[in-house]
Image (cartoon, rainbow, N blue to C red):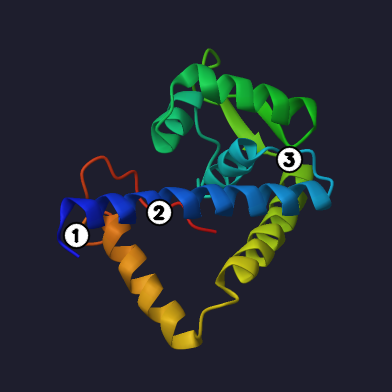
Amino acid sequence: MNSPDADGLLAEQLLRLTRRVHRIQKRHLEARGLGITPAQSRLLRTLAHYGSPPRMADLAQRLEVVPRAVTTLVDGLEASGKVRRVPDPSNRRVIRIELTDDGRLALRELRGARRTAAEDILAPLTGEQREVLGGLLDTLIDGGTAAGTGPGDAGPVAD
């Protein structure tokens, strides 16, 4: 499978799988009635990986989006009580974003929705096929380099 046509087919398959994952995840999110978009879900998951509340710029960098996109996501999550803006203790001009108790509860629900969505998608595969797929995906995610050292890699943002 080295021909350009085969590579094009693989690229198309990856895009179709990505769209399917998003569709199924969105369906599971809606079924749980959380009122959270997939982008907000990603921000909450990312936020949970910080030891202390990050700045908006930190979140934008980690998510690889423009700061304005983070502002919009935080606005929505703050309105629903999932996050709050807090002043930086050492520089009151700096605002940090922290999870609320509602945000932590939502994260638990989100993890359940993601697990259920993954089970739906992976159902046709055997355990051995899942292991092979996991190894292949790790290779693609890492870009063929050691874990977490690829160009532009902001590090792992797993659940």
Q: Which residue is the site of mark 1? A: 144
In the image shown, does 96 or 40 lie closer to the viewer?
40
Label number found at residue 14: 2
Amino acid type, residue under disc 3 in the picture: Thr
1 vs 3, front mark? 1
Q: Element type at marker 1?
A: loop
Q: Element type at marker 2?
A: helix
Image quarter for residue 86? top right
Q: Relative to 65, is 1 on the left or the right?
A: left
Amino acid type, residue under disc 2 in the picture: Leu
Q: Position of residue 41 (x, y in %)?
A: 63, 43
Q: From this viewpoint, which residue is outermost toward the top?
A: 93
For the residues labelled 2 and 1, the Cα–Cα distance comes to: 17 Å
Q: From this viewpoint, which residue is outermost toward the front?
A: 5
Residue occupying image coordinates x 21% and y 43%: 151
Q: Which residue is the site of mark 3? A: 100
Q: Residues within 10 Å of mark 1 (few under 14, many from 20)?
A: few
Compared to 95, does 51 lie above or below?
Answer: below
In the image shown, does 74 or 27 lie closer to the viewer?
27
2 vs 1, front mark? 2
